[in-house]
Image (tube, coloured by chain):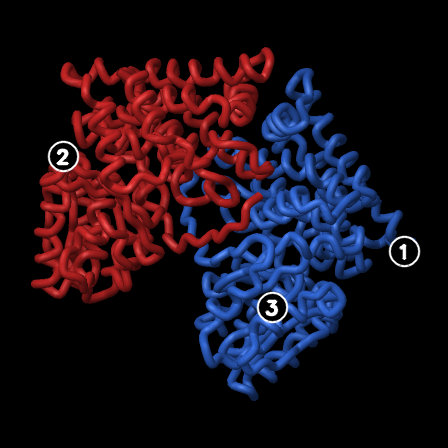
Chain colours: A red, B blue
Amino acid sequence: MLNFELYNPTKLIFGKNQYEKLKTEIPKNATILMTYGGGSIMKNGVYNNVIKALQGYEIIEFGGIEANPTFETLMKAVAIVKENNIDFILAVGGGSVIDGTKFIAAAANYEGENAWDILAKGALIKTAIPFGTVLTLPATGSEMNSGAVISKKETDEKLVFGSPLLFPKFSITDPTVIQSLPLRQLQNGVIDAYVHVLEQYLTYPSNAFLQDRIAESVLQTLIEVGPKVLKNPSDYIIASNFMWCCTMALNGLLSKGVPTDWATHMIGHELTALHGLDHAQSLAVIGPNLYKVQFEFKKEKLAQYGKRVWNLTGSDEEIAQKAIIKTQEFYQSLGVKTSLSEYSNSYKDTSQIISNRFKERGWIGLGEHKNINLEKVVEIVEMSY
Amino acid sequence: MLNFELYNPTKLIFGKNQYEKLKTEIPKNATILMTYGGGSIMKNGVYNNVIKALQGYEIIEFGGIEANPTFETLMKAVAIVKENNIDFILAVGGGSVIDGTKFIAAAANYEGENAWDILAKGALIKTAIPFGTVLTLPATGSEMNSGAVISKKETDEKLVFGSPLLFPKFSITDPTVIQSLPLRQLQNGVIDAYVHVLEQYLTYPSNAFLQDRIAESVLQTLIEVGPKVLKNPSDYIIASNFMWCCTMALNGLLSKGVPTDWATHMIGHELTALHGLDHAQSLAVIGPNLYKVQFEFKKEKLAQYGKRVWNLTGSDEEIAQKAIIKTQEFYQSLGVKTSLSEYSNSYKDTSQIISNRFKERGWIGLGEHKNINLEKVVEIVEMSY
């Protein structure tokens, strides 16, 4: 097992009818910026619940944070925070709203000239506006971690940042929000959580017996509840287990003491930036092909995964091969397409464009061994056509 | 799944050679009370490592915290904290030292007349001295939770308390400490962690699919590494997985969203108070008999446990029965005795004494259904003779 530090001070408030707790979690007399997305919270009742719970607070609203939140949009919120002496930000939404809020929280206090440097140059975050979240869409785990992904329209970039200062102070996660979600968002949520686990698990053996088993627990539970939540999102038992899996998949626990990959995400981000695939769709397209190209380096964990999660039998090599197919079939069984050509007609140059972009950014190799070079990226992307 | 709140701000620093981080985690210029136990830290090098890492700090030492730490001993440390304006307490030891330190941290700031009221009356803890830990004995999970168990010599009592203010700020957990531990402490550690999981798992089904699987992960890992760590505590792979299991068994995660039992602990504490059994020994004696007496209420989870953790086959009823036997045999295989008569010759009145004590304290029933009445306590204890 590798050395690690585990630190996660977010208070997760999980379950039904928890909105009342907003009052005890947000400091009295705080001026709040309330961030949200396209307005689904108006339809599903969450907006009303939040506003009702926050009576007596001064609230400024900032709606319109888009899926794959952009620097351009978020900088408008940063201006509002600065102008209005905002003390606390409350993100009401899914991963995009929460990720966007993390950027707002960091950028509002950023002293450098250009806040994009937080992403492009990894500029140090020294302070951040405190924030909490009300989660409306389980998928990304952003409600209980300190990282975020932000896009820049101007340059079609999608980059990652994080800081220990960017854990939400609290997150209210109510599984009843799931019943009003569109099918596509549920499909995405299952795959997003599933791939988050695989990024932290499907590497090479590192004698982290317990982490492996916990990762397998999340995968097994997602396989059990994923198809059911698509069919009946009002089933609270299924919805609550699904939501809890999404949080546990990326709240930091699974990565402790083990190597991690994240190459599927890095390549997938480019498919989103170039072709507008949903984040989870990009992961479903890239993941299985990446495992094929990296087979020699991942086969031991693939075999363990195949045996324990999919109950496959045969030689280790056979099980490892079958496990990749099982994974791809699982995504397809959820109704998610796993080839780029199913999403776009103009994909032929994608491998070269992505390769060139990685090169421009200063390439150091991807994956747990940092041995996914540009040739392999091209191979993975072309296998994904 | 039940509603829950998950909050755990302890920074866990896990692995080899982490003592240097004490300097970054303890505030500069703090006057430190360093608490420890019987002096094993002098022999295993931990004392020297800590003192070396804390050069420049003013340190007052308080050694001699006993296993099952007593109110009487701890109040001496409370006096030292008050007299010396202590800013930070560093517990260097196992669960007893850490539990004792939690009491010192709370009692030093307690405004009431008698600090024992924190335990006897559940008096509210409003502030506490901040503290961190260097763990030398994996077992109790106290390094990453906010609860503690304290004994009172005068009355042979052993009571539980806790507060969200009593999470360690940090805990340094280095698996190499395990190599110098006596066999008995390792045996106790395996059983302690195992029973901690069972208290949070072996209740009734509550549709918490993921928590169940994570609990089973810890049990499976303990079954795998437990016997090995007794044979070769210097094996870092085994030691690190064992240590991580002990923390995960009681850092709060497993109890989220599920009912919990804790009756084995409540009855076991009395065996320790009356007959001096080690904490883990008392759990190994009581647990299996409690499951037998509560069989009708636990049989569904016992069957799930038997299937998934012990790979048992048969009817659910048979599997549930066999699972209890497997559990008892597992404790015995670790060299731990599972009958009270193996520890004491004068045990005949134990069931009545415990029953009377519970009655005196204002009995409300134990276990996940609160249906373990005094008659059942007598039955469980007598089955344990």
Q: Amino acid at mark 3?
A: Ala
Q: Secondary structure at mark 3?
A: strand
The CA span between labels 3 and 1 is 36 Å
Question: Helix or strand or loop: what does disc 2 sit on?
Answer: helix
User: Outermost residue toward the bottom?
Assistant: B83
* Picture coordinates of residue B295, whole percent (x, y): 67, 32
Left or right: where A37 falls relative to A9: left
* Distance between mark 1 and mark 2 Cα atoms: 70 Å
B117 or A337: nearer the viewer? A337
Quadrant of the frame with the C terminus of chain A: top left
**Residue B320 percent across, percent down from the top left:** 67, 26
Q: Image point 28% across, 63% down: which residue?
A: A126
| Chain to which mark 3 belongs | B
Name the residue tied to disc 1: B346
Location of the N terminus of chain A by quadrant is top right
SS at mark 1? loop
Amino acid, disc 2: Lys
Q: Residues within 10 Å of mark 1 (few under 14, many from 20)?
A: few
Circle 2 packing at 10 Å, graded few (<14), some (14-19), many (20+), is few
Residue at 44% from the left image edge and 38% from the top image edge: A260
Q: Quadrant of residue A311?
A: top right
Q: Residue at 13% across / 39% down in the picture? A: A155
Residue receiving disc 2: A43
Q: Position of residue A266 (x, y in %)?
A: 31, 34
Label 2: chain letter: A
Specify few, some or many for label 3: CA neighbours under 10 Å numbering under 14, 14-19, or 20 or more.
many
Q: Which residue is mark 3?
A: B91
Q: Is residue B10 above or below residue A238?
A: below
